[in-house]
């Protein structure tokens, strides 16, 4: 089976938005490969470190919000 990693990344980004706190941080409870790709795409700051949350970039926060609404809003 071929997996569309961009769709996985979009879904993870939308779910990161679900855990948004302090306006721009999200809990980093996702696979490290996914978080690494989101960082490479400029959606989040570098996820590596002891802090248990990641910081959205401005672009990442807007995209996460849009994706969250598209995927989960009734």
Image (cartoon, rainbow, N blue to C red):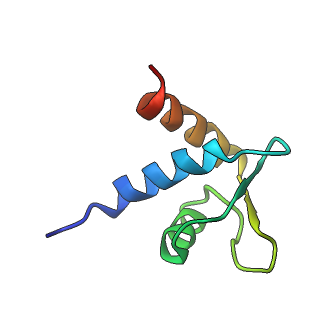
- In the image shown, does 42 or 56 lie closer to the viewer? 56
- Looking at the image, is 17 positioned above or below residue 68? below
The single residue placed furthest to the top in the displayed view is 74
- Looking at the image, is 50 positioned above or below residue 52? below
Asked which quadrant contains residue 44, the reply is bottom right
**From the viewer's perspective, is 31 left or right of 54?**
left
- Looking at the image, is 72 positioned above or below residue 3? above
Where residue 22 appears, as percent x and y from the top left, is 85, 45
**From the viewer's perspective, is 8 left or right of 45?**
left
The residue shown at (78%, 47%) is 24
The single residue placed furthest to the right in the displayed view is 22
Asked which quadrant contains residue 46, the reply is bottom right
The single residue placed furthest to the left in the displayed view is 1
The residue shown at (44%, 50%) is 11
Q: Number of marks in the image? A: 0
Give the quarter of the figure containing the N terminus. bottom left
**From the viewer's perspective, is 5 left or right of 28?**
left
Asked which quadrant contains residue 53, the reply is bottom right
The residue shown at (44%, 29%) is 70
């Amino acid at each position: 089976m071929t997996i569309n990693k961009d769709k996985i990344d979009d879904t993870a980004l939308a779910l990161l938005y679900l855990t948004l706190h302090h306006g721009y941080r999200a809990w980093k409870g996702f696979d490290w490969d996914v978080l690494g790709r989101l960082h490479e795409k400029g959606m989040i700051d570098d996820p590596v470190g002891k802090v248990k949350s990641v910081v959205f970039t401005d672009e990442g926060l807007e995209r996460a919000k849009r994706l969250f609404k598209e995927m989960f809003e009734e």
